[in-house]
Image (cartoon, grey):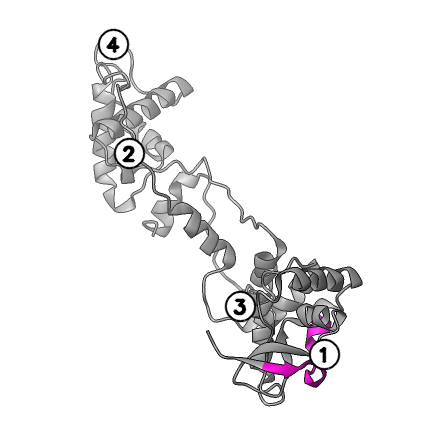
Amino acid sequence: MKKLTLVSISELEWSGEQEGLYGPPSNSEIMEFAESIKKRGLIHYPVITKDKFIISGHRRILGCMQLGRKFVRCRIEPITYKNNRKRFLKLLRDANRQRVKKISEVLKEELIDAAGNGAESELEREIIERSEISVEAMEIEGEKRRFQIKGNKPLLDAAIKIINEFRDYWPLADRTIHYKLLNDPPLRNKNDPNSTYRNEPYYYHALTGVLTRGRLSGSIPWEAIVDETRPFVSWDVCNNTSPFIKEQVDGFMKGYHRNFLQSQPNWIEIMAEKLTLLVQLLGPLP
């Protein structure tokens, strides 16, 4: 812990930035601090610059003044307010992180932090911390299996053949495999000669079931198939306004992209009827 220095309260300087960020403390706040200091003394000592500008402890100092005290012990940061204004603002901001603040105060703080240093956001840190849990392993008893692939073996074999032929375009959608099967339709069931695969919901449903069981049994690699007709939708959430405002300030105007085609008299656009053609048109997905 750094050395404490006894300083005359009358010599301390109040910066305009403190009041500009957080406004003047209320009378009730000053009285609460005075009562706390009277009962328990100063638990956390004020922090000041070498030229005696207050960085942290404004309300504590006002509480001491309310009690009629003339001196207060302070910790001195090795900077001056007049020559290190940027550093002073950062320290002032850090010293008040624990305070309950209004949205306007949070916005002013984040404008100070807008330069940033590339560190992960407050929300990301919290997610990481919450994910690091330690629990005892739980033994899973019993098992449940899907029905075995029996009569559908010709359909599975035909699907695997297509999946292997189009390996360069993985992952494939179920519908991609469905349309490819229509070029050379297999039997859906080897025991039914009239079950030739057709472009009907009944057969498509049978195919998706076979593909699922094929992946579970290891006949089809998991990474070979993707269902692009079921998009995953998520959104960021914040516990409070601070991380949201920081993200918005840091990203301001960074999403701008100029339309380079506006100066071109002609350009090529490719439109595909089916989403399943996306991989064939653009190549393998990253």
Q: Amino acid at mark 3?
A: Phe
- Quadrant in the rendering for residue 52: bottom right
Earlier in the chain: of badge 2 and badge 1, it is 1
Q: Amino acid at mark 4?
A: Asp
For badge 2, the amino acid type reads Ala
Assess disc 1: are there few (<14), some (14-19) or many (≥20) residues with their C-alpha within 10 Å of its C-alpha. Answer: few
Disc 4 residue crowd, few under 14, some 14–19, many 20+, Cα 10 Å: few
The residue tagged 4 is 192
Circles 2 and 4, Cβ within 8 Å, touching? The answer is no
Please tell me which of labels 1 and 4 falls first in the chain: 1
Determine which of the numbered discs, if any, sits on residue 260 in the image. Answer: 3
Q: Does residue 268 appear left or right of residue 279 in this picture?
A: right
Tell me the element at label 3: helix
Q: Is residue 265 visible?
A: no
Q: Which residues lie in the magenta part? A: 6-20
Residue 16 marker: 1
Tell me the SS state at disc 1. helix
Q: Earlier in the sequence, mark 2 or mark 4?
A: 2
Q: Quadrant of residue 186?
A: top left
Q: Is residue 159 above or below residue 154?
A: below
Query: Circle 4 sits in a helix, a strand or a loop, which is it?
Result: loop
